[in-house]
Image (tube, helix red, strand yellow):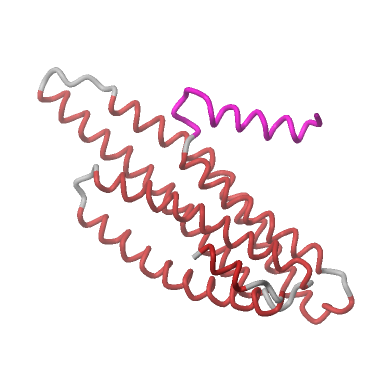
C-alpha cells in the first residue's frame, strides 16, 4: 500500500468511526474538491494538444479557477468539522439558570449560523464548478467527457448534502431574515446550476453517443 492509498483509507476509517466529525458536511466538501480535481485533470489532458490550441487560453483560465475552488473546498472540509465542534460545544453549555439558558441559546444560534455559512459556501463553490464545466464542455478532448460529467455529478452530490444540512440547521434557528437571504442566494445559484448541468449532460450524451436507454434507467 502506498502513502496515497494509506491516506485515503485512514480518512475513510475516520469517517466511519464513532466520532460525529468528520461527517456528512465534510464529505460534501470533499465531494466538491474531487469534482474540482477532475476538472483540472480534463484541462491538463487537453492543454498542449495542437488540435485544441484555439481553446488553450480558456482552458488555462478554467484550470486556475478549478484549482482555486479545490483549495477553497479543501479548506471548507476543515471548516465544517470546526463548525460542528462549535455547535456541539454550545449545546453542552450549562442551563441551570435563566441567564445560563439565554447564554446557551445565543451560543447555539451563533454556532449554527457559522455552520450555515460553511454549508452555503460549499454549495456556491460546487455550483461555480458546474459553471466552469459548462464553459469548456465543447473545448476539451472528447475522450475525457465522461470525467467531466463525473465532475458535475460529484459537485451535485456535494450540493445536495450541504443543502440538506443547511435546511436542518435553519430549522433549529429563529432567524427568518437570514433564512430569506439564504433562500434568495440558493434560488439564484440553483437556477444557474440547472441551466449549466442540462447543457453539459445534453452535450455529453450526444457527443459521446451514450446509450440513452441506460441513462434513462437512472431517472
Residue placed furthest toward the right? 50
Which x, y percent locates residue 148? 67, 64
Q: Give the residue displayed 80% in from the left and 82% down from the top.
A: 54
Q: Measured from the top left, where is residue 186 in percent x and y?
A: 37, 63
Q: Nearer the viewer, residue 99 or 75?
A: 75
- Does the stretch in magenta take in 8? yes
Q: How many marks?
A: 0
Q: Which quarter of the picture shows residue 101?
A: top left
The residue lying furthest to the bottom in this view is 54
Which residue corresponds to the image point at 63% horizontal and 69% vertical from the top-left? 133
**Residue at the image point whose x is 74% and y is 34% from the top:** 5
Q: Magenta includes 150?
A: no
Q: Which residues, given as a range, are shown in magenta?
A: 1-22
Q: Which residue is nearer to you in this view: 196 or 184?
A: 196
* 183 or 219, nearer to the observer: 219
Residue 95 drawn at (x, y percent): 17, 21
Quadrant containing the N terminus in the rendered view: top right
Above or below: residue 142 compared with residue 127: below
Please give left or right for residue 149 compared with residue 117 in the image. right
State left or right for residue 209 relative to residue 191: right
Is 53 on the left-hand or right-hand side of 127?
Answer: right
Which x, y percent locates residue 171?
24, 46
Tell me which residue sits at (31%, 45%) in the image. 168
Amino acid at each position: 500500500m502506498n502513502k496515497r492509498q494509506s491516506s485515503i483509507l485512514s480518512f475513510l476509517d475516520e469517517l466511519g468511526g464513532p466520532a460525529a466529525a468528520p461527517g456528512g458536511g465534510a464529505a460534501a466538501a470533499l465531494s466538491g474538491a474531487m469534482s474540482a480535481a477532475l476538472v483540472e485533470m480534463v484541462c491538463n489532458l487537453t492543454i498542449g494538444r495542437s488540435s485544441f490550441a484555439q481553446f488553450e487560453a480558456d482552458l488555462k483560465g478554467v484550470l486556475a479557477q478549478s484549482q482555486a475552488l479545490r483549495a477553497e473546498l479543501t479548506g471548507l472540509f476543515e471548516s465544517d468539522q470546526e463548525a460542528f465542534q462549535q455547535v456541539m460545544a454550545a449545546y453542552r453549555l450549562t442551563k441551570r439558570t435563566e441567564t445560563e439558558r439565554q447564554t446557551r441559546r445565543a451560543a447555539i444560534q451563533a454556532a449554527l449560523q457559522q455552520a450555515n455559512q460553511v454549508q452555503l459556501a460549499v454549495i456556491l463553490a460546487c455550483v461555480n464548478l458546474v459553471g466552469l464545466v459548462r464553459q469548456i464542455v465543447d473545448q476539451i478532448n472528447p475522450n475525457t467527457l465522461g470525467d467531466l460529467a463525473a465532475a458535475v455529478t460529484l459537485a451535485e452530490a456535494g450540493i445536495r448534502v450541504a443543502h440538506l444540512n443547511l435546511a436542518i440547521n435553519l430549522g433549529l434557528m429563529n432567524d427568518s431574515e437570514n433564512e430569506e437571504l439564504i433562500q434568495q442566494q440558493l434560488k439564484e445559484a440553483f437556477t444557474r446550476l440547472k441551466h449549466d448541468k442540462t447543457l453539459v449532460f445534453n452535450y455529453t450524451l450526444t457527443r459521446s453517443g451514450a446509450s440513452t436507454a441506460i441513462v434513462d434507467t437512472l431517472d
